[in-house]
């Protein structure tokens, strides 16, 4: 029986040799810890040629950036492995492949994606992956459809809902998305110069009612097995390839949350573009982000609709027209959740490099202000934004 | 260790002596099986004076009226005991008291309510219990509020959602409420003379879209721990007292389902009244049912609102005004689910005595037709019925 211990580089190599599925595991000789997240150790395992071949990821029992004072369940590794395996089953082309999981050690062995890069960095540097938005829409459609009531048998769905109950990770989202930015909280993180904009978030009845409704849906609407944190830092891209990773926030929740998180991170990049690029490049990058948003949504909606038309199991839900009606509801949810992502990444604990790495302070603050203004507007008017063209028009209006 | 066996009267007496909590258990001497439901044995346990003192209820491993060909999980007894105990904790005055539960035998020992009567029979006979509607509204408010996200801590709620997953009983509801009446199915049960009205249910796009949305909410909206079957046959009444029983359909679902079931059974009685009473009495009974409906809803809504204002734990959900907004959503859900109850009790497998015991065939068919027409209208226009007065006006319009 394995018991929890923090992995050393040697442990990681041994684990990769044992569970990496290589024909000649002895070529694996060296590990490098490359984790830049807050919650985990991530080792790349190199062969004798110096090529990274396998990744070994271990959950830490505390939040890394804060230290041992913020303990965090190791069970999240089980939930991550389970979520990624479930998603892989439905969309292997866009989900990282989990080769082995040990629950007691909270260790996953997974495919190496060293030939890929984190999408967020590429977006910031304005490196184009023309297929990525369509692939992200495809991923969302496949994994969310195949874990929804349209596809799963009712008994199977209920068993899955139970096995993906994820209280500790959901609590982080509940706090960081829906509580902290709308109250005075020590976890909040924004420059003093934005105090007025942030204070206004605490004092806007329409906004707080809309945020309450979104939080309530996050609490109670078990529509599909979400990734739960599908921002551009959880997405690896290469030419013609896109892979989702890091699913420790996976649980059965409102589909619009995943869609909104994905769209929200494209909008955060939109907000930050003028801080990283010259005027013309920034304008072009912004147009590209709006086109990306259109493509993520339309691909998602068209593919989900097509899957539902072809494969819906349930007699009532399969009635012609219902899926369109439900997609419209997902859309409005997505716009609202997208707004909460903009706000919590500007005001709350965890920011995005798209804005935070802008060297010029004044510009950085202007971009934060832009994200707050846009996020607030989207939350409040989500139910009146009828489609992705209307969203894009609104984004232009607030730019 | 106890293993499952079907209880005899002697077993029931022994169990009541052991677990009934009486100071002098030896006075319990005789059991009578009184179950009139389809799923369980129910024994009343009498003392030497011939007074019923304790009830012993055992779940059968099959549906009684159909026989052993329709097996049904014994785990429903655990879910019933758990649901009633949870509800009792929040509303002891209106929930039957479970004294003991044995999971292997699927046996509950519970308080005797022989001084109460089943509300449905009393409603049919036009016997008035003036406090019953208010008490039912109070029960619904207390048990649904205290098992919702307004009251439970998020981690506690999620653990409860998992422990109340109830796939087999939910499947019965999913089939009987949302599938069977809207398709040709051997379980359906209606007189041939209504074939035209029933056929129209299978062929109405607006209706089927609305039913799909209601079923989807039943599948996915885990708002509170529902009773799951709170019709007037699951409610005992006496002067000044009301007790809910029979909670084997308990699970975390949309609050409007319980509220709509309760209102729907009052409307079914409304529809059946002319079949049991003279013209004047029937008219008076109908007015009383409409007043009852108003009182159930207004009590529920006012009490839920007051509980939320006083006790909501969640920072976002506690924002002033959100509870009203959510109650409005519950209301529309309730009207829709109420409509499905009218339809499934007229067309589907399981009918109500309020209509089925009407001696005159023509009158009985007219009452069924009325329930179908009214149910269909309520489902389709649920989102446009703004409040209980509007509902009552619509009911008059369709009478």
Image (spheres, coloured by chain):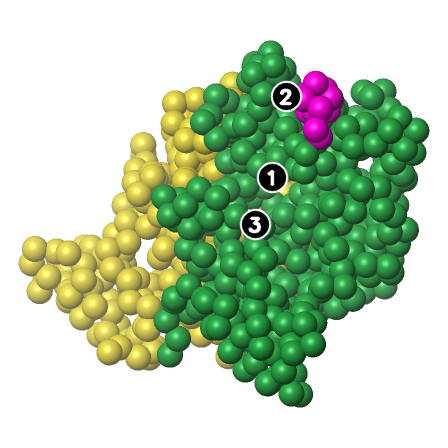
Chain colours: A green, B yellow
Q: In which image quadrant can residue B176 be found?
A: bottom right
Residue at left offset 67%, top offset 51%: A234
Majority secondary structure in the magenta region = helix
**Mark 2 or mark 1: which comes first in sequence?**
2
Distance between the Cα atoms at labels 3 and 2?
31 Å
Q: Is residue B128 visible?
A: no
Indicate whether residue A365 is drawn in magenta.
yes
Locate residue B93, reporting x and y percent. 30, 38
The residue tagged 3 is A37
In this rendering, the answer to whether B85 lies above or below B147 is below
Inter-mark Cα distance, 3 to 1: 28 Å
The secondary element bearing badge 1 is classed as helix
The 10 Å Cα crowd at callout 3, few under 14, some 14 to 19, many 20 or more, is few
Q: Of marks 3 and 1, which one's residue comes earlier in the chain?
A: 3
Numbered badge on residue A207: 2
Q: Mark 2 and mark 1: span between their CA atoms?
A: 15 Å
Q: Which is nearer the N-term, disc 3 or disc 2?
A: 3
Percent of width and height locating residue B369: 73, 45
Q: Nearer the viewer, residue B356 or A91?
A: A91
The residue that appears at 33% across and 38% down in the rendered structure is B91
Magenta-highlighted residues: A358-368
- Tell which of A228 and A278 is nearer to you: A278
Asked whether residue A56 is in view, the answer is yes
């Amino acid at each position: 029986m394995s018991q929890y211990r923090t992995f050393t580089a040697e442990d990681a190599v041994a684990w990769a040799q044992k569970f990496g599925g290589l024909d000649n595991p002895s070529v694996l000789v060296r590990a490098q810890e490359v984790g830049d997240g807050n919650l985990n150790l991530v080792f790349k395992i190199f062969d004798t040629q110096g090529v990274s071949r396998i990744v070994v990821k271990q959950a830490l029992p505390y939040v890394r950036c804060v230290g041992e004072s913020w303990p965090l369940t190791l069970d999240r590794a089980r939930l991550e492995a389970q979520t990624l395996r479930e998603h892989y089953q439905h969309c292997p082309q866009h989900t990282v492949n989990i080769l082995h999981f040990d629950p007691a050690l909270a260790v996953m062995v997974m495919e190496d994606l060293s030939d890929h890069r984190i999408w967020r960095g590429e977006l910031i540097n304005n490196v184009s992956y023309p297929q990525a938005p369509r692939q992200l829409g495809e991923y969302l459609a496949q994994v969310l459809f195949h874990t929804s009531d349209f596809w799963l048998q009712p008994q199977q769905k209920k068993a899955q809902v139970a096995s993906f109950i994820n209280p500790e990770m959901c609590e982080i989202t509940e706090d960081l998305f829906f509580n902290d930015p709308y109250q005075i909280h020590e976890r909040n993180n924004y420059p003093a110069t934005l105090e007025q904009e942030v204070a206004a978030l605490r004092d806007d009845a329409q906004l707080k009612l809309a945020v309450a409704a979104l939080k309530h849906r996050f609490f109670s609407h078990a529509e599909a097995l979400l990734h739960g944190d599908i921002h551009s830092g959880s997405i690896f891209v290469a030419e013609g390839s896109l892979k989702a990773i890091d699913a420790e926030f996976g649980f059965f929740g409102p589909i619009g949350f995943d869609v909104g998180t994905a769209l929200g991170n494209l909008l955060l990049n939109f907000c930050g573009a003028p801080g990283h690029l010259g005027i013309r490049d920034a304008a072009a990058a912004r147009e590209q982000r709006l086109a990306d948003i259109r493509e993520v949504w339309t691909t998602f909606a068209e593919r989900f609709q097509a899957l539902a038309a072809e494969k819906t199991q349930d007699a009532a839900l399969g009635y012609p027209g219902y899926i369109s009606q439900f997609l419209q509801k997902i859309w409005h949810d997505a716009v609202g959740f997208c707004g909460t992502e903009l706000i919590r990444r500007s005001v709350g604990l965890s920011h995005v490099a798209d804005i935070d790495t802008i060297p010029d302070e004044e510009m950085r603050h202007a971009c934060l202000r832009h994200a707050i203004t846009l996020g607030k507007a989207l939350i409040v008017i989500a139910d009146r934004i009828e489609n992705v063209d209307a969203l894009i028009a609104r984004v232009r209006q607030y730019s």
